[in-house]
Image: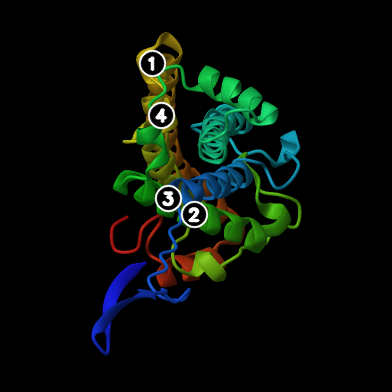
Amino acid sequence: MNDYPVPSGNRILHKTRIPSPHCCTEITLPMSLLKAPLLLLAAVGSWISSTPPNRPPNKQELLKGDALSNPAMAAAFFKYATVVPFILEALTITISTQCADAVSDRNCLQWQEVSNILMPRGNLQSLQHPSLTFYIGIVLVYVGSLIRYTCFKYLGRFFTFELAIRENHKLITSGPYSIVRHPAYSAIFFLVLGQYALLFGEGSFLRASGRLEGVFGMLLFYSLTISWMWGLVGFIRRTDVEDDALRNQFKKDWEDWERRVKWKLLPGLY
């Protein structure tokens, strides 16, 4: 509030200016409150993308020559290795934001003890503010999850993590399969790049907590990096095995589809 003079005869009165409640009101939303739900959505997308939508095929339906010996187990490893850190990061951000000014709130104090265990270094400033790497990672995970979920829906019971030709198998050429022949693998490329950025990029939980510098963090980093690289090579090799199997099964229908959809993974590139 400001005082300003108002002339009145020979006297000067001081009148108080009362600011309007609608004037100069600034509403800010902490970026940390945005980061936590974005991470939880990324965790949900990663979980769904890494969970088989159908039961494994029987032995008679399995194809030979799969570059991945146990794809379901590999998917489970990636699922927990990515989803758990996402949830822990969202939990830490929520605790530090909601209980920042708590002095006597017993529940907050208990949760802050949990936060101190998760973040022994206490670098919450780095954790709370989303970086450009974080936003890029979020977009990639969302795009990959959406594509993969769409593939689950279009293939229905024919989608299995194991290479297989199922009983009464049909050739699906619509939806994402009208753009590239193996869109579910394309989705994995987006997912892997996004998850890598969220796990190990600037401002991530593993970096801010200092755990990336410990034995556990280094083991997680190298095991995921090697596994991801091996998996991506395996998926590229898988496209040839799948194409050969579908060509043998559907013959002219597959050849017509291949003429219409020339690209395996990325339009214009591969």
Q: Is residue 142 above or below residue 222?
A: below
* Residue 218: numbered disc: 1
Task: Give, as a three-letter code, the residue at label 4.
Answer: Trp
Q: Earlier along the polypeptide chain: callout 2 or callout 4?
A: 2
Q: Earlier along the polypeptide chain: callout 2 or callout 1?
A: 2
Image quarter of residue 270: bottom left
According to the image, what is the colour scheme of the structure?
Answer: rainbow
Per the image, label 4 sits on a secondary structure element best described as helix
The residue at 57%/29% (across/down) is 103
Q: CA distance from mark 2 to mark 4?
A: 23 Å
Q: Earlier along the polypeptide chain: callout 2 or callout 3?
A: 3
The residue at 26%/90% (across/down) is 9
Per the image, label 2 sits on a secondary structure element best described as helix
Q: Are marks 3 and 4 in contact (CB under 8 Å)?
A: no
Q: CA distance from mark 3 to mark 4?
A: 36 Å
Q: Residue 199: x and y, percent? A: 42, 33
The residue at 76%/41% (across/down) is 55
Q: CA distance from mark 2 to mark 3?
A: 19 Å
Pointer 2 residue: 142
Q: Are marks 2 and 4 in contact (CB under 8 Å)?
A: no
* Badge nearest the viewer, 2 or 4: 2
* Residue 230: numbered disc: 4
The one of 138 and 262 positioned closer to us in this rendering: 138
Q: Earlier along the polypeptide chain: callout 3 or callout 4?
A: 3
* Residue 31: numbered disc: 3
